[in-house]
Image: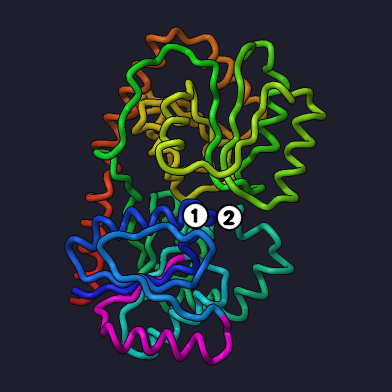
Amino acid sequence: MKIVHYIPSLDRASGGTAAYMALLARELGKSAELHVVTHRSPCPLPLENCRTHYISSSLCGRMAREWVKALSAVGPDVVHVNCCWLPQCALVQELARRAGYKTVLTPHGMLEPWIVRRHYWTRKLPALLLYQRHAVRSADCLHATAPAERENLSRLGYNANIVVIPNGICVEDIRMKTSWRRSGSLLFLSRIHRKKGLELLLEVLAGVKPALSGYELTIAGEGDADYVGTLRQKARQLGLDRMVRFVGGVYGEAKWALFRKADLFVLPTYSENFGIVVAEALACGTPVLTTTGTPWEDLRSCRCGWWTDCRADSLAAALAEFAALPESALEAMGRNGRRMVEDRYSARTMAAGMLRLYRSLRG
């Protein structure tokens, strides 16, 4: 079976979507002939078990010609488009549809209510009217990564053919921590964006500072320089200069070392279709605090973290509870999280689900 994936960017600064593509390619490429089409970027993530094709990102005729040429050369059974709102995504999907290929669209959380409401009148509504609504309607299948995302896609009323396949990680390659002795480290590691809730987290930290005496929050990730500057200024204004450390993008073994060192991983996001960093933290044996803006209710049911409302009082209560726990409780939560990820969120399971979807579309 031949599969073509289109993704606007594989750059490491793209965050979860690029990481998702790297993980999926590694496993899916073992069972299918996989081709990934994208645009050039400064720091692309390396992909295994597939062939990567680069085409122009210009919306002039050059991009369309190069995309159609790539499709013709591969002759795929299914074309899988990743992401929304960029006209390039809608263009490649429409050209594939017109050429007679089956198409799958993965929004990657970009059609979640919080995202749709943001800049609705100035950006989202014009895009919906011009191309995005048609792209969602015309896809042969929508791929959601969690039941909550499927429900939100259903409410849009554009396309009822929705399949849930959770994202996964290569958990067997991730080394779990060996000690849960408190290190005094809290960790945020993700793309730095307004939807991630960092401003709220800083305000909460200022309020619970006495309960977290001796703790430091490491903020790791890349983002808009002006916005990062705003966060730094806010931390200073809240008196958190010595408690908050911005380290920029961290990758490779340095990233895993941060996960293992942390006593708690915190992702106070307003909206997340999956949150691969949550799975990575759990695989390292680190308890997680995140919000109901993510699909991670398993944190509560499997007793490996906190899944709470994205409000200051709820986050403050969870942090206070964390601070009062004995180290033995942190270890139990860490081991529970590792087992849960092994059982439910492996990259092999994700790739197998994708392959079943493609075969069903091919008929």
Q: Residue sitting at 48 percent across and 24 percent down?
A: 262
* Front residue (pair 16, 304): 16
Question: In what element is the residue under mark 1?
Answer: helix
Q: Is residue 80 left or right of residue 228?
A: left
Q: Position of residue 161 (x, y in %)?
A: 35, 68
Q: Position of residue 248 (x, y in %)?
A: 60, 42
- Say few, some or many: other residues with alpha carbon within 10 Å of mark 2 (under 14 / 14 to 19 / 20 or more): some
Quarter holding residue 309? top right
- Say few, some or many: other residues with alpha carbon within 10 Å of mark 1 (under 14 / 14 to 19 / 20 or more): many
Q: Which mark is residue 12?
A: 1
Mark 1 vs 2: CB contact within 8 A: no
Circle nearer the N terminus (1, 2): 1
Residues drawn in magenta = 58-82
Quarter holding residue 162? bottom left
Q: Position of residue 173 (x, y in %)?
A: 27, 39
The correct choice, above or below, for 48 with respect to 271 in the image is: below
Point out the residue furthest to the right here.
237
According to the picture, the residue beneath numbered tag 2 turns out to be: 113
Marks 1 and 2: which is nearer the front? 1
- The quarter in which the N terminus is drawn is bottom left
Q: Residue sitting at 38 percent across and 84 percent down?
A: 96
Q: Which mark is residue 38?
A: none
Give the tally of numbered discs.
2
Please state which amino acid type lies under the numbered disc 2: Pro
The correct choice, above or below, for 27 with respect to 142 in the image is: above
The colour scheme of the drawn protein is rainbow
- The quarter in which the C terminus is drawn is bottom left
Query: What whole-number distance in Å separates the C-alpha atoms at marks 1 and 2?
Result: 26 Å
Q: Is residue 120 left or right of residue 359?
A: right
The correct choice, above or below, for 318 with respect to 325 in the image is: below
Question: In what element is the residue under mark 2?
Answer: helix
Q: Residue sitting at 21 percent across and 76 percent down?
A: 362
